[in-house]
Structures are given as structure tokens and as C-alpha cells.
Image (cartoon, helix red, strand yellow):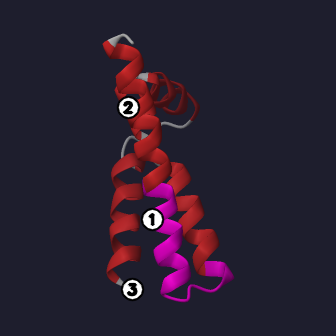
Amino acid sequence: MQEKDWLSLVVVHSDTWLLALAFYFGARFGFDKTHRNRLFSMINELPTIFEVVTSAAKKQVKEKSSVSNNSGSKSKSRSNLYDFISCI
């Protein structure tokens, strides 16, 4: 197996594990429907590890920036996620 293929496989499994962990803790701490939907939307705003490693995220960021000229949206998404986690 080539190194590139192996790395892609590892990051896909990492993405899956992180999503499972996030939703496990969401269920464990008794998030209601609105909090689970909010968590889901915040996770979807961020690129996956696979996208970052394969540099697909760079292409998406360029496409998004051409659609909306909001340069601080990525940092706002991360801060919203940290705020959400800290309120648990």
C-alpha cells in the first residue's frame, strides 16, 4: 500500500471516530434535539481531516470565499464550536 493511500485511510477513520465521539458525548450529556442539530451544523461548517490532508479543503475555501466575501467565517465557526463545548 502506498503511503498516500495509507494516510488517506487513517484520516478517514479518524474523521469517523471523531464524529462518533462527538455524537456519543452529545447523547451522553443529554443534548436535546436543538442542541444536537446545532452540534451537527457546527461540525459540518468545518473541513474534515481528510479534506485538510488531501488539500480538498483549500479548494472549498476558495469556492466559498468567491461566493461570500466573509474572511472571518472559519475562525468564527471554530470559536462557536469552542463556546458550545464549554457550555457543557
SS label for mark 2: helix
Q: Is residue 47 visible?
A: no
Can you identify the residue that label 1 sits on?
21
Q: Residue 10's quadrant in the figure?
A: top left
Q: Nearer the viewer, mark 1 or mark 3?
A: 1
Local crowd size for mark 3, using a 10 Å CA cut-off: few (<14), some (14–19), many (≥20):
few
Graded by Cα atoms within 10 Å as few (under 14), some (14 to 19) or many (20 or more), the crowding at tag 1 reads few
- Which label sits on residue 52? 2
Q: Is residue 28 magenta?
A: yes
Is 85 on the left or on the right of 44, as rendered?
Answer: left
Q: Nearer the viewer, residue 85 or 29?
A: 29
Cα–Cα span, label 1 and label 3: 15 Å
Q: Which residue is mark 3?
A: 88
Q: Mark 3: which amino acid?
A: Ile
- Residue 82 colored magenta? no
Left or right: where does residue 79 sit relative to residue 9? left
Does the image show residue 42? yes
- Decide which of 4, 69 is in the foreground and name it: 4
